[in-house]
Image (cartoon, helix red, strand yellow):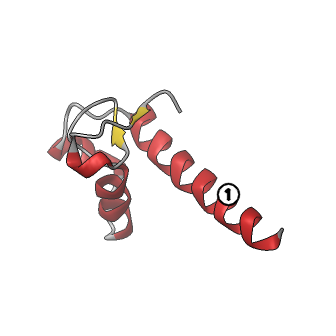
Amino acid sequence: MNRITLEPGKRGGRPCIRGLRITVYDVLSMLSSGMSQQEIQDDFPELTHEDILAALAYAAEREHQIYSYRVQ
């Protein structure tokens, strides 16, 4: 999770990948639109396989937290 950064002045404070201007949302949107990991990396060569996995892990953890709060 150290690949996900939050900076108040960058991209509206949204979670970004390694301080880049690419948000977790951007990566998830590309994946959900059907882009493959390789296509994403071709368009954004600064992203690594681990960055994409970190975005997925971040989203999964956030979903887990939201669900956990609702159950309690």
Compared with residue 8, is residue 31 higher up or lower down, i.e. above or below?
A: below
* Pick the front one: 22 or 35: 22
61 vs 46: above or below: below
Residue corresponding to mark 1: 65
Q: Residue at x 30, y 46 (%)?
A: 13
Residue drawn at point x = 33 percent, y = 50 percent = 14
Q: What's the residue at 19%, 41% (across, down)?
A: 44
Determine if residue 14 is in view: yes
Check the image and report above or below for 12 versus 42.
below
- Using residue 66 as the reference point, say whether residue 5 is left or right of it: left
Residue 7 pos. (x, y %): 31, 36
Front in this rendered view, residue 19 or 69 = 69
Circle 1: residue type:
Gln
For the C terminus, the image quarter is bottom right
User: Where is residue 20 shown, x and y percent of the image?
Assistant: 23, 34
Check disc 1: other Cα within 10 Å, few if <14, some if 14-19, many if 20+. Answer: few
